[in-house]
Each structure stands twice: as structure tokens, then as C-alpha cells.
Amino acid sequence: MSLDYILLGLLREPASGYDLKGILGKGIGHFWAAELSQIYPTLRRLEKQRFLKSRRIASKRGPSRVVYETTAAGHEELAAWLQAGPQFQDMRHIFLAQIYLMDELCDLKQTLQFFENLRMRWAFRLEGLKCVEKEWARRDPLFPDRLSSESFHRHLTLRMGLHSYRGWLTWCEESIRRIQARMEQEAATNAGASRVGDDTFL
Amino acid sequence: MSLDYILLGLLREPASGYDLKGILGKGIGHFWAAELSQIYPTLRRLEKQRFLKSRRIASKRGPSRVVYETTAAGHEELAAWLQAGPQFQDMRHIFLAQIYLMDELCDLKQTLQFFENLRMRWAFRLEGLKCVEKEWARRDPLFPDRLSSESFHRHLTLRMGLHSYRGWLTWCEESIRRIQARMEQEAATNAGASRVGDDTFL
DNA sequence: ATCCTCATGTAAGTGGTTACATGATTGT
DNA sequence: ACAATCATGTAACCACTTACATGAGGAT
């Protein structure tokens, strides 16, 4: 469903399915990728619904391009979706399920390792996003206060990534501290138990 | 794929598909729900793979229960999955796509409204989670430093929710500030433009 | 010659949802 | 009598992925 609206929204100027895959890849594709095999039938469906119209254009190389553009009805449909308020779907993080079930292993060292892995990955991604933003700042003299309306909205989505990763990193760090504290606790009670064992042995 | 492991992991004691739906609903279901129509065939598949074994047990009311339990092979499979490190899938937040495309509306007031809506919802959910944690703290004398291994891991996942919502809320607040600043900018340039208009009119 | 990019698509499979079918028991 | 809960399942659909098919043109 959502890909429909994304394609509709991405069609600022006429473009083919192949073009859209490229456009998608650069920007929104960072959080919403799509394959050509999904894009092509979606565009057809949107045309059947009269939200798009197409024309075939001969291509320099390869088969002729099918170029789509948004109709007035398409713009209305998109506007209605945007005005309907934020849409959610429940977030299914596989790694959360893994943590939830991780006591199956009865080994806090593994839980710790898992979190250190998470922390590392997210630290990388956070650095990546920071670089993207820095690069943007360096290249675009309008950044960040005089951006075009389009770029302004895109920048807001980029900021979401930064805040997400930062939040998750602090969660990782908190968790690592908790796990380490628990491991020390375990070690202490084990030491206590073995000392008791020694005592009874004497 | 993941539901397989979740069911495997949730089968600490023998349970039927119906039971599992209930178990799922209480804990992990907050971030990984599943319908009975998906659970039943999954359990069958897991049995065919020898990760589970089942027996029919007459029920007090309704049809006879099919009760599953994990085999040794099942435990191994689950352990392997947990030890394989964190699994990710790309997070597709529909609302992010909406924001990305929102400049289509050419109306910052609507973007602002959108973010205020987001902020409100997440503030609610954050409060909800805080309550859950407070309630837990009130009822469980072992909270938070002496929890069972199972509860400890569950608590870690709850903390993730808190950190997520907090991060997203700060993003919302930052965004709202940016949007308001931009609206003032727009108002100023409009005022400037109309003053220029007045000047040229004079 | 061979591979890469451009450009279109189909088919099969995955993971999940919604809707429907069946039927016993308990509580109001 | 009627609804709710217990308990099983099937069928159809949806969004998306992976793999495959086709073929032109330009680069190495």
C-alpha cells in the first residue's frame, strides 16, 4: 500500500519504473527500498486507478521506456494520504525477540557479547549518518536554515535516524552496565557458595 | 522465519497453539504479535522438522488440545539462532515516508500538525511503558537488581521501548522547533515581499 | 567475444493478515 | 436463548523478495 504513495510522491517529474528505482535508491531508499519487480506492477496498478498516466518513449539502448506522470487525481490521493495523519505499523525488531529469549542460553557472557555487537553496529551507522549530514553541510550553503522545502523535509527524516541510533546506543550502554553488574553479582554468589563449600569440607 | 524461533523459545513448558497465542499476547506480543492462523501451521512445520513433538489431550471443553514440547534438536536450533548474533531487517516507518513526501502539500502548518500528532502519541506510549515499569517495581520485590534471568532479559527489552520513545520524542521536539523557526522565516520574507510591493506601489 | 548498463517484465516463494468454518462448554 | 471462551483449522489475499527471461547498446 505505502509503496503506491511513495511512487506517487516521487513522480515530481515524469519518470520510468527504472528511473524511480534510481530515485528511490538515493533518498527515501535508505529506509524504504523496493525492487523493480515490485515497482513495475505497482505503476500499472496506479495507472489503472487513474492516478498515473503513461507513454512509451523510444530509448537509446534497450527496450522503449514507459514514462509515467501523476494525474490530478493522483495528487489528490497523495495529499489525502499525507493529511490523514501519521500511519504506524508495529515495529518487529528481530534482535528484540532474540534478547527476549536469550535467557535460554543461561550465559550472560553471550548476552553481553550480543549487546556489544549491537552497540558497535549502531555506532557505525550513527557515524555514517553524521558524515552524510556533515557532507551536506559542507556542500550546500543553504544548510540547514535556508534549505528548500523538499530538502527541509528530507533533513527532518535524516534527523530521525540520528536520534534513533543515539537512543538505541544509550540503551545498549545501559544494558551493558546492567549485565556487567549482574555478572559481578553472580560471581560473588558463586564465590560465596564455593567458600561455604570449602567451610563444610573442613 | 522468526516466528518459528519465537514459538520454539516460548515453549518452556508444553503448550498448545492456543496457549502460545496467550503467552505471546502477554509479553513478547507487545512487539511481535501473531495470529492463530499463522501459529498452527508453524507448529506443524516445526514438528515435521523434528524441533517439536506433539500429543493430543482431551479438553474439558471444545476440541482436543494439541500440546507441543521442544525436542533436544529444537533447543539446539534455537540456541544456534540466538548465538548467530543480532538479526536486522530494515525498518520501514510509514510516517517517515509521509514526512519525506510532505513538501508536496506546500504547507508547513500541516507538517507541524503532523509532528505534534507524533509527539502526542509517543508521549502517551512512553507514559504507558513507564507505568508498566513502575507497576513491576511496585509488585516485584526483586526489581530491578535481583530479577530472574528470564525477567532480566525481558526487562532489557522493555528498556529498549523507553529509550526508543524518548529518542523519538526529542526528535519531534527538535523538528517542531525547526518548523516553527522556518514558519517565522517565511512570515518575515512574506512581510518583506509585501512591503516591497507597497514600496513599488507608492 | 564478453561483460556492463539500460529497460522491461514474469513466476515462485515468504511471512504475514483477514475472513471464514466448525463445534463444545460455561456463564448470563 | 445467547454470547463468550476454548480450540482447531482452511482459504484468500497482501506486500515484498528472489530468481529468472529477454534483449539492445556501449565499453574493454
Image (cartoon, coloured by chain):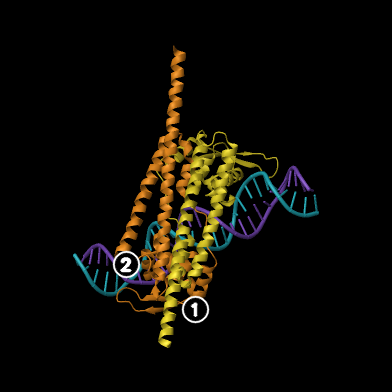
Chain colours: A orange, B yellow, C purple, D cyan
Query: Is residue A6 positioned above or below B6 on the image?
Result: below
In this view, the residue in front, A28 or B168, is B168
Q: Chain of mark 1?
A: A
Mark closest to the chain's N terminus, 1 or 2: 1
Residue A17, relative to residue A171: is it above or below? below
Q: Position of residue A170 (x, y in %)?
A: 42, 46
User: Residue B173: where, in percent of width, then height?
Assistant: 47, 58
Category of crowding for the residue at label 1, using alpha-carbon neighbours closer than 10 angstroms: few (below 14), some (14–19), many (at least 20) = few
Residue A87 rendering spot, x and y as whole percentages: 53, 61
Residue at the top extreme of this rendering: A202
Viewer-proximal residue, B44 or B108? B108
Give the number of the mark in front: 1 or 2: 2
According to the picture, the residue beneath numbered tag 1 turns out to be: A72
Query: Are marks 1 and 2 in one subunit?
Result: yes
State the residue lying farthest toward the bottom. Answer: B202
- Disc 2 packing (10 Å; few <14; some 14–19; many ≥20): few
Residue at image x 49%, y 55%?
B169
Specify the farthest residue to the front.
B202
User: Relative to the observer, which residue lies in front, B147 or A43?
Assistant: B147
Q: Please give the residue where the numbered disc 2 appears in the rendered image.
A: A140
Q: CA distance from mark 1 to mark 2?
A: 33 Å
Q: Chain of mark 2?
A: A
- From what the image shows, is residue A17 above or below residue D4? below
Q: Amino acid at mark 2?
A: Asp
Residue A18 visible, this orientation: yes
Q: Is residue A7 visible?
A: no
Amino acid tagged 1 = Ala
Is A194 displayed left or right of B117 in the figure?
left
Residue B157 appears at what percent x and percent y?
A: 49, 44
